[in-house]
Image: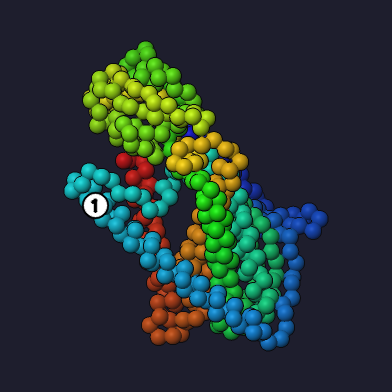
Amino acid sequence: MQQQFALLYIVVLWTLLFTLLSTAFKDREFKFGFAKLKFIVGGMLLYFGKDVRPRQGDASRFDKVMRIVHIVAMFLGIVLFYLIFIPSSFNMLKGFIEFSTGATTTPPQPVAVPIPLLFTITSIVKYLIVSIAIGAAIHEFAHAVVALREGVGIRNWGVGCIFLIPLAFVELDDDSFKNASPVSRASIASAGPFANALVAIAVQLLIVLTLSSGFALSTAVEVTNVNCSLCNALQCPGERLGLRSGDIIYAVNGTVVRSVGEITKVLNATKLGSTVELIICRNSVCFDGNATLDAYNVEYMSKYGLAKPCLGIGMQNTIILLKNGRPYSNPLIQELLLYLNFIFIVNFSLFIFNAIPLFITDGTIFLSSIAMNRGLMGKFVEHKILDKVNVAIILIAIAISTYLFIGV
């Protein structure tokens, strides 16, 4: 368990260290050549830039066209959130209520990332860090470029790291931004999400081109170790099958399995002493194996008093490369697809969740620019009604997803 949550411990230590440094040095800045370092709660900021003066003069035809494109893209992001995330969240909530009341035995599929998942699957950390860094840099660069073209200056810019999450930032000149026209402010606010949407589209095209060659990514179950102490037997089924760390359990009884939960469900529904047919894949070679489940799970017996079959292996969810539907070992292509998939997911998420109003997102600035002092919509924006509703929906979705991840 300690190894499983190693990333959580690192994040906590990082947060404590930089929070203490922030408290000790307060707003003090440390100069390193042309850069300045500042400690903040949970991390640090590194300032590189200086004041940049905006372009003077009237907006060009290109700028006017891009204003429309930015604003349309922003509305599209808002629509996608309400068409995709909210219906999925309500369906999950409905399924959760039915599951909790016993109306169904099937738990709903989580629609948000369970919080523990961020700290337990450490194999995805490098992909997330790179993807977030790329997405954040492009997002802020787009804000800066459009701001300068709209006559708004830049006071500073730089990079940072908060809670071990990389970020980029651009500080606009507040006075010139407030004095800009509503459409200019809306265009500046929309530029970042629009840039993330472009990256997501471009990356998705690359993924499609790669997958057209017969490759695909899939979740799968990986054997982490063979441990017969999990069972009430000196020699367990996993050991008799010759399973090794790194093996992929591709199918059970002819059905492809994508997660540890699916295998656990099959084992719990199988009678002790029965035989299950497994397809095991190792280094792109798959072979059949029959496992006689003549041992029971010791932990399950001690908790529930029930003898459930035990394979005697440790398992974890992983991501593998498939070629023509079968596990395929090609580290270069797998790494490429993993990076592309995470870059797409992160940029698409930045597009959607920055488009909607969430107090600190571009969506809040965008709606304030176009709807303030405009009837009922203006009152909604002024009192941040949509922000509160959106935050509540997202928090409920995360809470239920986390509960399902931990408790089901």
Along the line of sight, the residue nearer the viewer: 174 or 75: 75
Residue 123 appears in view: yes
In the image, taking residue 64 as reference, residue 106 lies left or right, namely left
- Residue 68 to residue 200: above or below: below
Amino acid carrying mark 1 in the image:
Ile
Drawn side of residue 105 relative to residue 330, left or right: left
Q: Secondary structure at mark 1?
A: helix
186 horizontally vs 294: left or right: right
Residue 341 image point, x, y percent: 53, 51
**Residue at point 48% right, 34% down?**
4
State the quadrant of the C terminus: top left
Res 280 quadrant in image: top left
* Image spot of residue 184 (x, y percent): 59, 80
Instruction: Please tell me in which quadrant of the rendered image residue 222 appears.
Output: top left
Residue 349 spot, x, y in % from top left? 49, 59
How many numbered marks are there?
A: 1
Give me the residue at 52% from left, 79% from top.
369
Q: Residue furthest top?
A: 234
Query: Circle 1 is placed at which residue position?
Result: 97
Depth check: 152 or 252 in front?
A: 252
